[in-house]
Image (cartoon, rainbow, N blue to C red):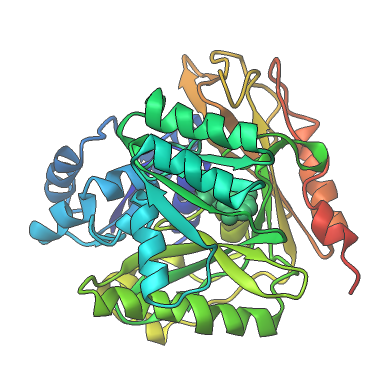
Amino acid sequence: MKILVVGSGGREHALAWKLAQSERVQTIFVAPGNGGTATDARLKNIAISDPAALADFAEQEHIALTVVGPEVPLAAGIVNIFRARGLKIFGPTKEAAQLESSKDFAKSFMQRHHIPTAEYQTFADLQAAHAYIDAKGAPIVIKADGLAAGKGVVVAMDLHEAHAAVDMMLSDNKLGDAGARVVIEEFLAGEEASFIVMVDGKHILPLATSQDHKRLLDQDAGPNTGGMGAYSPAPIVTPQLHARVMREIIVPTVQGMAKDGIVFTGFLYAGLMIDDHGNPKTLEFNCRMGDPETQPIMARLKTDLVQVMEHAVNGTLDSVELEWDRRTAMGVVMAAAGYPDAPRKGDVISGIPPETADSVTFHAGTSLNDKTLHSSGGRVLCVVGLGDTVKLAQKHAYDVVEKIHFDGAQYRRDIGWRALNRKH
Ligand code: AMP
Ligand code: GLY
């Protein structure tokens, strides 16, 4: 069987790596892929990105199943295009992807269906936005309505920062159409966790929990990034909290979409803020897997992912029971010099050791030129370590990180600190 994975990041490398472990797979195409997918003999990169051209390719190659990694092709309607041509694909339609592609859509959806989230209002008018900020006070959070590649959220700790964020989006148009409307919402304090499930339109299959590290520097300092590391499971998500998130957030979301006439299929990712009393609220929805959360999650998945995906596209996820490695998986991102503002490209990467039973390195912004690996993006690699304890998983990850070299590499030394500090 041939499978197509759409995307080029660490998330897609991890998905392709896991799918390739299935005995039923002949070839996995990755479009466009990266230096890691280029070096794995079971995977084949193809330089196509246009959704209609990808559908042509899937038809010609008799691709049994397509899995989409990033949000941009989903928001552009790749699932609608594939389905219209009778091609099997796992992901949300363009309509369903609005849960991620429009913050205003997501917020009004949550309000309508009583899904816990921060209080908010949406503005296109500059003066009204400024007035709302003055009325509410700081800290306060300003979000561009549309997709902004991780640059659309400003958590303003003072009024000056809040007003400047609104000016940047509504007046200076720094984010283009994505920032033509802004959601201004209440600041929520607490600890974040990533709660990701698979949905087949009807049934919901939760994946293992995880926790990301959004800030660039140790101790959660520095600018926001796409994510500097993640581990799974996230101990903050106790079985009780898990049940509550399913009951209060995930199930009402899938049912609410159906009530609104939109059948949700694909990965559904709720970014949670959990307060000191253990109450969860939804910070955001993504309609795809997280990056880097996918890397540790896939490292722990024991079940054949091809089989799971088949159930997902056939509407039979209720018959799947996932089996997980009981160990902790810890993913440490190695990013390029200058990330996140202006990542440098073209640095030679050396020293990546082969995969072992307790570590694997996924590529993100890498490319293979003349048999040499070069950096080609902001987040370059994600090294995953596995261990019976959080500490051991961390050690296995950092042992590998220290063997890898590229000029200007940036990585956090403290991935996993929340789990390590937890008292059980
Ligand atoms: P988002 O893209 O909506 O997940 O926002 C990016 C990051 O901004 C989140 O992971 C949080 O760290 C932070 N954030 C978003 N919304 C809020 C909020 N209402 N209160 C506090 N922090 C937030
Ligand atoms: N790691 C956060 C995200 O994928 O959105």
Residue 293 visible in the snapshot: no
Query: Which percent across, then down, holds residue 250?
Result: 47, 75
Residue 406 placed where, x, y %? Answer: 68, 19
Rendered position, 93 above or below 262: above
The reply to whether residue 42 is in sight is: yes
Residue under the image location 31 percent in, 60 percent down = 91
Which quadrant of the rendered structure holds the C terminus? bottom right
- Dividing the picture into quadrants, the one containing residue 1 is bottom left
Q: Can you tell which quarter of the image residue 421 is in?
A: bottom right
Q: In screen coordinates, is 359 left or right of 64?
A: right
- Rendered location of residue 25, percent (x, y): 36, 58
Q: Residue at x 57, y 15 (%)?
A: 344
Would residue 112 be found to the left or right of residue 261 on screen? right
Considering depth in this image, is 221 or 336 the residue closer to the camera? Answer: 221
Towards the viewer: 297 or 137: 137
Q: Nearer the viewer, residue 33 or 106?
A: 106
